[in-house]
């Protein structure tokens, strides 16, 4: 069984902001590499959805995993729907907890 990945609508903004920040600070090659690492980490959640730290203190069922050297992916697993719900992707000290709390599905 393969779990489906679903994204909060604002995650695309998160990823664009991360890409722009990395390009401006480290160049496009590093940006491409880091975004590929983020994509790989998200894709891996379809196979192993229950990994990461559970952060019920932020929101019920919320989990967080690192991706690359400075990125955090915040998500929840809906076992009944067989989905991983990506709430936020943040980089370089971004407020992933606050974004996740504000974006609960």
Image (tube, rainbow, N blue to C red):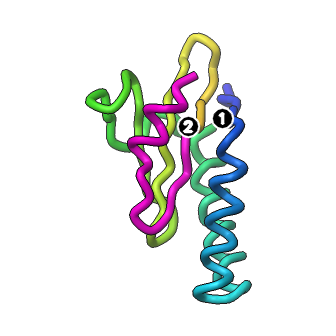
Give the residues drawn in magenta, as a range. 87-105
The percent coordinates of residue 78 (x first, y second) are: 55, 19
In which quadrant of the rendered view does residue 55 lie? top left
Placement of 99 over or under 23, stated as above or below: above
Query: Element under label 2?
Result: strand
Give the residue at x 68% y 81%: 23
Residue 57 falls left or right of residue 80: left
Please state the horizontal and vertical placement of residue 54, each as a whole percent of the image: 33, 34
In magenta segment, residue 1: no
Residue at image mark 2: 87
Instruction: Measure how far apart labels 2 and 1 are at the Cα level.
Output: 5 Å
In primary-sequence order, the first of circles 2 and 1 is 1
The answer to whether the residue labelled 2 contacts the one labelled 1, judged by CB atoms less than 8 Å apart, is yes
Secondary structure state at the residue bearing disc 1: loop
The answer to which image quadrant residue 18 occupies is bottom right
Disc marking residue 30? none
Residue at the limit of the structure toward the top, as seen here: 80
Name the residue located 43 percent from the left edge and 32 percent from the top edge. Answer: 101
In the rendered image, which residue does mark 1 sit on? 8
Spot occupied by residue 90 in the image (x, y as percentages of width and height)? 51, 56
Could you say where residue 40 lies in the image, as x and y percent from the top left? 64, 58
């Amino acid at each position: 069984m393969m779990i489906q990945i679903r994204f909060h609508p604002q995650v695309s903004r998160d990823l664009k902001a991360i890409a722009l920040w990395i390009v401006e600070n480290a160049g496009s090659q590093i940006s491409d590499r880091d975004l590929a690492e983020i994509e790989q980490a998200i894709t891996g959640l379809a196979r192993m959805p229950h990994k990461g730290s559970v952060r019920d203190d932020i929101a019920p069922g919320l989990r967080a995993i690192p991706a690359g050297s400075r990125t955090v992916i915040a998500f929840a697993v809906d076992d009944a729907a067989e989905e991983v719900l990506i709430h936020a992707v943040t980089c370089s000290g971004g407020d992933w907890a606050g974004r996740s709390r504000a974006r609960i599905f």
